Image (cartoon, coloured by chain):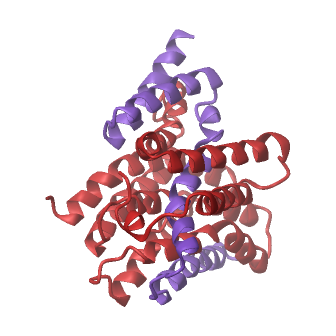
Chain colours: A red, B purple
Amino acid sequence: MRKPFSRGITHGIPIALGYFSVSFGFGIVAVQSGLRAIEAVIISLTNLTSAGQAMGVAVIAAGGTLVEMAVTQLVINLRYALMAISLSQKLDDSFTTPHRLLAAYGITDEIFAVAAAQDCKIKPSYMYGMISISAAGWVGGTLAGAVANMLLPASLTAAMGIMLYGMFIAIIVSPAKSNHKVLTVVAIAAAFSSVFKYLLPAVSLGFAIIISSVAAAVIGAILFPVETSETEEKAQ
Amino acid sequence: MSIAIYILVMAGVTYLIRMLPFTLFRKKIKSKFIQSVLYYIPYAVLSAMTFPAIFYSTGNSITAAVGTAVAVILAYFKLPLIVVSIAACVAAFAAGLVI
């Protein structure tokens, strides 16, 4: 078995590549909103989140208040609290308070999902491996987008937009194939999310994702409660 | 107002949201219901984030659909994450050349 840190790096590579393409777009938007490249990079380095950063830049550009900034960040990023609690259930005993303080920085949708899908207890070094390469991709993409809008042909940067989703599909299809409970939850979540997109466009994306996924998970928990042993050894 | 103060508030709030529950939450959750919800949450979040957003991820719904199909097929055969991810990108790019 490979060392947790290098395993974390390996698992983080697709995240980093996907982040690079997303933050490339963020870098462009941030500069167009009047920020300097270095400010865009610092935002990416200190926040490590897409929707929250995009909203933050919009608040800055509009000259909003600090309260407005704090509240939008709280609402948009509240899902991380949920993920942090969920992940805290899977931590190895070596995950002491200093490690938690450090690794908390890197709880994103993608890092959480990959870590939560592991079939073993999570070690700090595994998180550090995955977080460091993912953050490098996120910050690097921001810088690339901010300083050079023309690095790649538009046809290629457009296609790169699907990479992150391709990774999500890889994570959910494999267990959904062999586990009808997971398949049902996945289908319900996709259906709710589509309803928000096409029938309730007034609901912001962040809330739509939160409501869809919590509702699907609650329905799954009611229809198919899982045994403790099952939660310990998640289907890969 | 200084941009540095905005960034400080932004980063501070975002970090606290992650750090407080991650650090303070030490109890093992006993409730079978809560455990079940937490078991399903990652899959539900990823699914809700992916669908229908993936069909808009390349700026062209046809190339996105091609990329999606390739990703689902390769994931079905349990190929590694990065292979599925890059293949979806290459398929979408190739579809864009053909169209």
Q: Nearer the viewer, residue A199 or A41?
A: A199
The single residue placed furthest to the left in the displayed view is A1
**How many marks can you see?**
0
Q: Vertically, is B46 above or below B16? A: above
B35 relative position to B81: left or right: right
Residue A82 location in percent, x, y? Answer: 58, 72
Can residue B89 be seen by looking at this rendering?
no
Q: Quadrant of residue B56?
A: top right
Q: Quadrant of residue A225?
A: bottom right
Q: Vertically, is B71 above or below B97? A: below
Residue visible at 60% across and 79% down?
B8
Residue B62 location in percent, x, y? Answer: 61, 20
Residue visible at 79% across and 68% down?
A63
Placement of the C terminus of chain B among the 4 image quadrants: top right
A64 relative position to A15: left or right: right
Residue visible at 54% across and 39% down?
A149
Residue B55 location in percent, x, y? Answer: 62, 32
B92 relative position to A31: left or right: left
Q: Vertically, is A118 above or below A81? A: above
Q: Nearer the viewer, residue B72 or A160?
A: B72
Residue B28 location in percent, x, y? Answer: 44, 84
Can residue A39 be seen by looking at this rendering?
yes
Residue visible at 23% across and 65% down?
A5
Q: Quadrant of residue B31?
A: bottom right
Q: Vertically, is B87 above or below B85? A: above
Placement of the N terminus of chain B among the 4 image quadrants: bottom right
The single residue placed furthest to the top in the displayed view is B98
